[in-house]
Structure formats: structure tokens, C-alpha cells
Image (cartoon, rainbow, N blue to C red):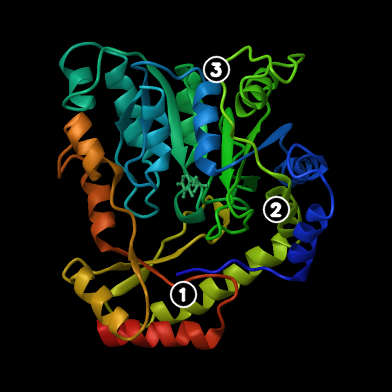
Amino acid sequence: MSSPDLTDSEREAVLEVLRTPRLSMGPRLEAFETGVARRVGAKHAIGVSSGTAGLHLAALAAGIGDGDLVITTPFSFVASANVLLYERAVPVFVDVDPQTGNIDPALVEDAVHDLLKSGERRQRRLPRRGAADGALKALLVVDAFGQPADYDRLMKEAKTHSLSVIEDACEAFGAEYNGRPAGMFGDVGVFAFYPNKQMTTGEGGVIVTSRDDWAVKIQSLRNQGRAPGDTWLQHTYLGYNYRLDEMSAALGAAQLERFDELLSRRARVADWYGERIAEIPGVSALPMAPTTTMMSWFVYVVRLDPALQRAEVARRLEADGIPSRPYFTPIHLQPYFVERFGYAEGDFPVAEDLGRRTLALPFSGVMTEEQVDEVCRAVRGAL
Ligand SMILES: *Cc1c(COP(=O)(O)O)cnc(C)c1O
């Protein structure tokens, strides 16, 4: 489905680390963090062992805990809601915009309004079970498929009600919303660098924030709860080992050097797809919001017309040797969420509709135009 875009400069950068004795907590991590901070204009950038680890620490920095309510999207990779469960908080899902698949700001405003009340209106917003009477604490916003959510309205709403905002920009490193970088809208933003993302560290992620106190807390929690001034075996807080090793950081720094090239190679492949998909009846490309002034292509998804059977289309593609994936199964319908919170089909109809009709096609910056052609011919044939 995807392939990292690597050259000898990345390979040499990793080998270089292996010629030194410093394999963790060394100069490569600092260099990589500085590079990411500079790229997006963040005051603090903190490398971590995965995007999921980054989101978990972001939730801890925001003070999210037992029973707290957090408004988030059901149309995402499961990690964005899981990190709330790690802290026994309750994800309150709000449906998404049918075009972009990002959380719908108008529905967020309605949900905030209801949740700040008591009684029936509030109750209707909560999951059927597993929610105590916690307070609304934060928004956890996801930039789906590399397209930023609608931050003007979301941030205004958050400010009005003093809610923290966590930005899951794990799919959107390099994207821009009205000329400003994804990851920089909330109190804290998280990027992820798994091998299928726009750039990779193998496993890894980076947290960005402009809040000094949150940065100190995050740095401490990723490193076993050692507070500034603690010695190696002193642990002021309950911490984790969420560190990013030096080989991964070196790979990240080398990828970051090539990041504009990586993005433009992905955009070129997406353009090849776009031209062909537009000519095939029954499928459509992902619509772009006018606020998306820079798209950072993460996956290439198409939407099938409602009458088509996606599973059958995928089967026919597979028979032609073309892999494809349903994208996303909404989080509220994942078995664990159904069991714990009692979510059911019909709860978030837009996310469910997109979840039923969206198919991800093979995509990476190293694909050739001939390969895109081959995939699109198979798509046409399957339809
Ligand atoms: C990739 C991704 C993450 C983090 O994934 P890791 O594999 O833990 O790095 C989180 N949220 C979303 C929406 C993602 O796509």
C-alpha cells in the first residue's frame, strides 16, 4: 500500500550513529527536534517513540484524567481516541464534514452547548454507558488524510469555553491551513513518522507546543517521570519510556532535509491520480477545503458512489494484483468502543457513510506514473 522514500543520505545518517557509542538521548534527537521546531515555527518540539505516545503525553499535559469529557472525531485512526481511554477519560464523538471528513465545527458548537448544560440535552451527547458525570475538558481534533480541520471556528469555540485543544496532526505534517502549519493551532500538536507517513523515523513522533510548562511536563513524562534536576534514579512523576532513539532521530533529520522534495513527490503522484480518477464514473477524489492552502498527501483515498459494493471492488482489484484498504472504520464502531460505551450503528451517520464508501489506493512518493496508470485501469475495470 505504501513505501518510504529513502536515499543513501538517510542510510548513511543511520550508519553514522552506529559508529558512535550514543544510541539514545544524544545529539541526533536534539538536532531532529530543532529541525521540526524550525519547520513549523514551534517554540518546543519533543521527540517521542510514536505518534500514539505523543498523543498520550499531550493528553497528560492537558490534564486530562478520570471521567473527563473530550470532544473528538469518530473518523480517525483508533489511536486518537485510545489515548483518552489510557487516562480513563470519555471520548464524546461529534460527526464530521461530509466533504473533508474532518470534525464539523457547527456540530462541535452544538455539542459544547449541550454538554455544558445538565439534564436530557447533556445526557443525549454522552455514550450510552461508561460515562460518569465528568466535566468537558478539551477538544481533540484530527487532521484527516493530510488536510487540516477547520481551526478558525474550532479555536474560537475552545477559547470561549476555556477548553484545551490537542491537535492530532499525525497525518498532516507539512500541511497548511490558511497559510499556517498544521500542528500549530491547538495548545499542543502531534506529528507521527511511521513508515507510511509523509516522512519516517521508522517508529516515532514529535510533539509541538508553545507552552513552556507543558513542554517541561512532556519532557519529564517521556523520560520515566524525571523532573528537571532529578538524577538518573529519581522519578518525581509517574512517567513512561517514550523516548526516540538516536538511529530514528538521525533518520528523521535526514528525511527532514528532503521534506519539501518528499511532499512534492507525493503531490505529483496525487495529481496523476486526480487526473485519472476524475475520468472514471463511480468514484471521486477527496474534496479540498478552500482553507487547505497546502495539502500534505498522506494516503490517496477515493469515494465510491453509494450504490457500489466496496468489498467487491476491493476483491476485483486484489485479483488484478492491486491492494486497497477500507478507510476508516469509524472508531465508535470498533468492537472495544461498542462494548465499553454502547455505541451503535447510526450514531454518527456521516462518518459511517464515509467509512463505508472510502477506499485507499496504493500511494507513496516513489510511485511512477505508469504504476498510477495501472492502478487506475484496474479501478475502472473493477467498477
Ligand atoms: C498515524 C496516526 C497516529 C499515530 O500513529 P503511530 O503509529 O503511533 O505513530 C495517530 N493518529 C492518527 C490519525 C494517525 O494517522
Residue at the (71%, 62%) spot, across then down: 260
Q: Looking at the image, is mark 1 or mark 2 earlier in the sequence?
A: 2
Q: Is residue 70 above or below residue 372?
A: above
* Distance from the alpha carbon under mark 1 to that under mark 3: 48 Å
As rendered, which of 378 and 157 lies closer to the eye? 378
Residue that mark 1 sits on: 274
Q: Secondary structure at mark 2?
A: helix
Residue at the (55%, 43%) spot, across then down: 50
Say if mark 1 contacts mark 2, CB within 8 Å. no
User: Which amino acid, by three-letter code, is at mark 3?
Assistant: Leu
* Distance from the alpha carbon under mark 2 to that under mark 3: 28 Å
Q: Secondary structure at mark 3?
A: loop
Please provide percent x and percent y for residue 108: 35, 32
Q: Is mark 1 within 8 Å of ligand 1?
A: no
Q: Of the residues tagged 2 and 3, which is closer to the observer? A: 3
Please provide percent x and percent y for residue 98: 32, 52
Q: Is 306 positioned to the left or the right of 234 in the image?
A: left
Residue that mark 2 sits on: 252
Question: Dot 2: within a 10 Å radius of its alpha carbon, few (fewer than 14), some, or many (20 or more) residues?
Answer: many
Residue that mark 3 sits on: 238
Q: Looking at the image, is mark 1 or mark 3 earlier in the sequence?
A: 3
